[in-house]
Image: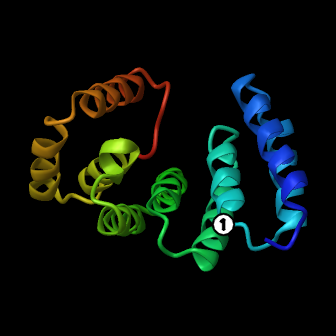
């Protein structure tokens, strides 16, 4: 870490507090401060991507993920974040690849963050790879929280409250 570790710790703590209060832009600025202090902090880039996603700044989120991966190519959660950005950018084949990489790096990543299963499942359906999607759905059924989240997302898509691309 090239910056002052106490200063960086303070930025992270402030970012977490702001994020908990729904203040995404302010939390993002705290992470930018971390990156200014330590441009090689992969966690800061991954967290930046995570914050950019709900702000619908998908290209920026993807760029942050790619920077995090350049620094630390072994962080499964960064690949999950990358898959979410790619999903919104309608780059479905890359979604599948990112989810597969997350699972390769950490077989428990999908259980810890259901986005990996959900993003891959939807991407497979959109790509017309129904057989693979069906196999993945059998796995999703073993994780009730993931299945519930998937079903809520599909319902939101049906209501027009969320979308990626018409199926």
Q: Is residue 113 left or right of residue 162?
A: left
Is 163 located above or below residue 57 in the figure? above
Residue at image x 53%, y 60%? 78
Image quarter (top left, top right, bottom left or bottom right) of the C terminus: top left
Q: Looking at the rendering, which quadrant does residue 102 occupy?
A: bottom left
Number of marks in picture: 1
Residue 125 is situated, as x and y percent measured from the top left of the image, at 24, 51
Residue at image x 70%, y 26%? 20
Instruction: Determine whether the residue tagged by mark 1 lies in a helix, strand or loop.
Output: helix
Residue at image x 67%, y 72%? 67
Residue at image x 48%, y 56%? 77
Looking at this view, name the residue that lies furthest to the bottom: 70
The answer to which of 21 and 99 lies nearer the viewer is: 21
Is 85 located above or below residue 72 in the figure? above
* Colouring used for the render: rainbow
Residue 64 is situated, as x and y percent measured from the top left of the image, at 68, 63
Image quarter (top left, top right, bottom left or bottom right) of the N terminus: bottom right
Q: Looking at the rendering, which quadrant does residue 22 occupy?
A: top right
Q: Is residue 67 left or right of residue 139?
A: right
> Can you identify the residue that label 1 sits on?
42
Q: Is residue 166 left or right of residue 140?
A: right
Q: Is residue 65 left or right of residue 113?
A: right
Can residue 59 be seen from the camera position used here?
Answer: no
Residue 23 is situated, as x and y percent measured from the top left of the image, at 79, 29
């Amino acid at each position: 870490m090239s910056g002052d570790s106490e200063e960086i710790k303070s930025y992270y703590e402030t970012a977490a507090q702001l994020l908990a209060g729904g203040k995404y832009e302010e939390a993002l600025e705290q992470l930018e401060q971390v990156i200014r202090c330590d441009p090689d902090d992969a966690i800061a880039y991954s967290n930046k991507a995570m914050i950019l996603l709900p702000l619908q700044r998908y290209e920026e989120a993807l760029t942050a993920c790619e920077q995090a991966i350049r620094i630390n190519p072994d962080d499964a959660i960064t690949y999950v974040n990358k898959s979410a950005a790619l999903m919104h950018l309608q780059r479905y084949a890359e979604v599948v690849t990112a989810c597969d990489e997350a699972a390769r790096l950490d077989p428990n990543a999908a259980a810890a963050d259901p986005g990996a299963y959900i993003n891959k499942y939807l991407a497979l359906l959109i790509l017309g790879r129904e057989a693979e999607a069906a196999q993945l759905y059998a796995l999703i059924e073993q994780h009730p929280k993931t299945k519930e989240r998937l079903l809520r997302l599909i319902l939101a898509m049906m209501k027009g409250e969320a979308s990626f691309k018409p199926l």
